[in-house]
Image (tube, coloured by chain):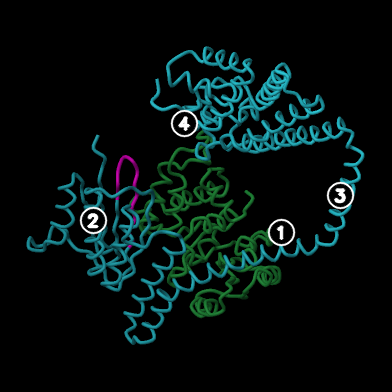
């Protein structure tokens, strides 16, 4: 398999160059962008496989980048990378279409691994995102009949393990299922996260002006 | 029977004076009302007394919901006031005290209009209680004045604008009545022509002045608004600056003086945590008596003491009680162990609080150890974690292996 081609979007040039230096030996970084407009242009020009996307940027942030790329019929895989801990930021960018969320204190090897995994179609959840999702899906759903509003016990179990800091392989071992099944559960949770009309999710998204 | 004399607006027709008397002395309100009407026939004495009582006796805090929603509103009050005054005037006329017919209708109109306006502005605030939004029962104890506004009790969210609109139109009708009274008086006294000239001159001057001063007034208002928001902004900036001085700048100064990388990292992490808590509007760790802040505070201490990052994820939250405090203390001990023996790996803490149970997992990726092989004199695990949990009706389970590191699971189930 070829290495994914990556565009790095962050408004802090210092952080960009740091990540670039760390990832360069592991992945192919084709471009950097520091603003929403630059990111739009870089995505259009380089057609990357994966966009490492900062959540907070002037001019609409990561959500706006995803929206513009979608408007231009460009659909690279987005992986959100942020220092933000706020649920509404994280949920908003996931609901806009990002395939995963990792925090900026992740190690370079783990980051490269996460990029490869979203490139392979998997969803990448940090422990904190798993916590947010569990929080959002706890409590009664407004319309419990829609399966989108509820997590299955297995999905809940997988998320709890992610929140406890387990890697997918370790989760597979502990739950005695295949790593592919773990991936399937996480992808299913991601789908629910993006499509569910649960009040908590829509509220979080609405806080960031996401008309979903 | 009630202790003090209060106007009872919940049962009253006009100002609740009669109902208040009836309540106070335990008689039928109708009796009191008849007494007043009879007194009114006697040279208007009853009316004067009634108005005096309305002014002097304060309104009671009687439960308003007892009033039946008959919609006896401003219109009836205004009509009633007008008719009462008419009767008083007629009584005067009968007594031979009389000025001119020209003032009868204007006075009656003025009284009606004034009743409308006063009822709107002096009556109970017609704003519904802000708290029970969306509670269907909220319409039951809506203040009296709001009743004519939304008789069908359309949903509570809609009632506030409707109430405002009703009060506006009520005031409008009242003012129109008073103005009409003025015109009627002028017409009757034949002074309308003269008055028209005056009014025209007045209107012309107002228009002229308005054209001259409107831009200036507008600019003044705008600049006042701008100044006000600028003042608010600068206050906010001052607060942020004060906070940054106490926290971030202090830490940066410490970082510049330090040449120990580990200390710098610890400082940075502590500052980051504090700043995040501040940004999220949470109380600083250690202040709130809730599970999540308590766990975060414990993690912060362990981080500071051992220089190992501790990541805390909490799902749900609950108040601290002795058992929950014990869980936090056990978790802190587990974090300390993980930081000491985890080989410097990140410590992951995950807590999930549901009404049925509280679960806390503390995990490191260190070399692991054999829980059964811990010597009896090592009190850390046995006493501070397992023993403490059992004393509070909970359980602790420790799994450890060289491949996966160590995980301590604390479980506290609800009794019942």
Figure colour of chain A = green
Q: CA distance from mark 4 to mark 2?
A: 64 Å
Magenta stretch, residue numbers: B348-359
Crowd class of label 4 (few under 14; some 14 to 19; many from 20; radius 10 Å): few
Q: Residue at x 47, y 47 (%)?
A: A136
User: Which subunit holds the residue at mark 2?
Assistant: B
Q: Quadrant of the N terminus of chain B?
A: top left
Between marks 4 and 2 in the image, the one whose residue lies nearer the viewer: 4
Q: Is residue B205 left or right of residue B328?
A: right
Q: Which residue is mark 1?
A: A73
Checking the image for residue B241, the label placed there is: none
Residue for badge 3: B203
- How many angstroms separate mark 1 from mark 2 (CA)? 49 Å
Chain of the residue on which disc 4 is drawn? B
Where disc 4 sits, the SS reads loop
- At mark 2, the secondary structure is strand
């Amino acid at each position: 398999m070829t290495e994914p081609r990556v565009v790095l979007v962050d408004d802090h040039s210092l952080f960009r160059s740091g990540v670039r230096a760390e990832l360069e030996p592991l992945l192919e970084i084709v471009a950097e962008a520091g603003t929403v407009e630059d990111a739009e242009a870089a995505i259009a020009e380089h057609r990357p496989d994966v966009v490492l996307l900062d959540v907070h940027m002037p001019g609409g942030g990561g959500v706006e980048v995803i929206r513009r790329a979608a408007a231009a019929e460009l659909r690279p895989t987005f992986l959100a990378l942020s220092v933000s801990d706020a649920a509404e930021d994280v949920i908003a960018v996931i609901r806009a279409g990002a395939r995963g969320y990792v925090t900026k204190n992740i190690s370079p090897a783990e980051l490269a691994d996460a990029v490869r995994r979203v490139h392979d179609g998997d969803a990448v959840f940090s422990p904190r995102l798993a916590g947010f999702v569990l929080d959002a899906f706890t409590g009664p759903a407004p319309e419990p009949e829609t399966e989108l509003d509820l997590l299955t016990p297995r999905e809940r179990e997988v998320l709890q393990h992610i929140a406890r800091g387990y890697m997918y392989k370790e989760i597979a071992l502990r739950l005695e299922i295949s790593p592919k099944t773990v991936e399937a559960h996480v992808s299913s949770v991601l789908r629910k996260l993006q499509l569910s009309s649960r009040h908590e999710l829509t509220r979080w998204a609405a806080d960031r002006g996401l008309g979903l | 029977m009630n202790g003090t004399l209060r106007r009872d607006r919940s049962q009253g027709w006009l100002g609740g004076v009669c109902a208040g008397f009836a309540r106070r002395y335990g008689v039928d309100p109708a009796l009191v009302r008849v007494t007043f009407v009879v007194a009114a026939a006697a040279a208007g004495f009853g009316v004067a007394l009634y108005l005096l009582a309305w002014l002097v006796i304060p309104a009671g805090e009687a439960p308003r919901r007892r009033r039946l929603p008959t919609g006896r509103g401003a219109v009836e009050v205004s009509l009633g006031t007008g008719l009462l005054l008419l009767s008083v005037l007629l009584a005067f006329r009968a007594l031979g005290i009389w000025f001119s017919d020209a003032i009868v209708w204007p006075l009656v109109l003025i009284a009606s209009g004034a009743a409308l306006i006063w009822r709107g502005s002096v009556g109970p605030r017609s704003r519904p209680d802000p708290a029970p939004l969306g509670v269907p029962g909220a319409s039951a104890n809506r203040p009296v004045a709001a009743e004519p506004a939304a008789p069908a009790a359309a949903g509570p969210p809609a009632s506030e604008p409707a109430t405002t609109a009703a009060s506006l139109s009520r005031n409008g009708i009242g003012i129109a009545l008073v103005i009409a009274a003025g015109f009627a008086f002028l017409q009757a006294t034949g002074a309308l022509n003269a008055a028209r000239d005056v009014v025209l001159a007045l209107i012309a001057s107002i228009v002229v002045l308005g054209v001259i001063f409107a831009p200036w007034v507008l600019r003044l208002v705008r600049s006042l608004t701008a100044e006000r928001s600028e003042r608010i902004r600068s206050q906010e900036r001052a607060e942020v600056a004060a906070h940054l001085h106490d926290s971030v700048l202090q830490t940066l100064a410490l970082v510049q003086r330090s040449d120990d990388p580990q200390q710098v990292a610890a400082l940075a992490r502590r500052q980051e945590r504090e700043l995040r808590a501040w940004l999220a509007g949470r109380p600083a760790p250690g202040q709130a008596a809730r599970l999540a802040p308590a766990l975060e505070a414990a993690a912060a201490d362990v981080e500071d003491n051992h220089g190992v990052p501790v990541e805390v994820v909490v799902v749900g939250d609950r108040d601290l009680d002795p058992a929950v405090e014990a869980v936090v203390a056990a978790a802190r001990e587990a974090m300390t162990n993980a930081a000491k023996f985890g080989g410097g790996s990140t410590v992951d803490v995950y807590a999930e609080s549901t009404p049925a149970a509280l679960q806390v997992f503390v995990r490191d990726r260190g070399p692991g150890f054999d829980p059964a092989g811990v010597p009896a004199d090592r009190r850390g695990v046995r006493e501070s974690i397992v023993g403490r949990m059992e004393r509070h009706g909970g359980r602790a389970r420790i799994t450890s292996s060289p491949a996966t590191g160590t995980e301590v699971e604390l479980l506290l189930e609800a009794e019942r």
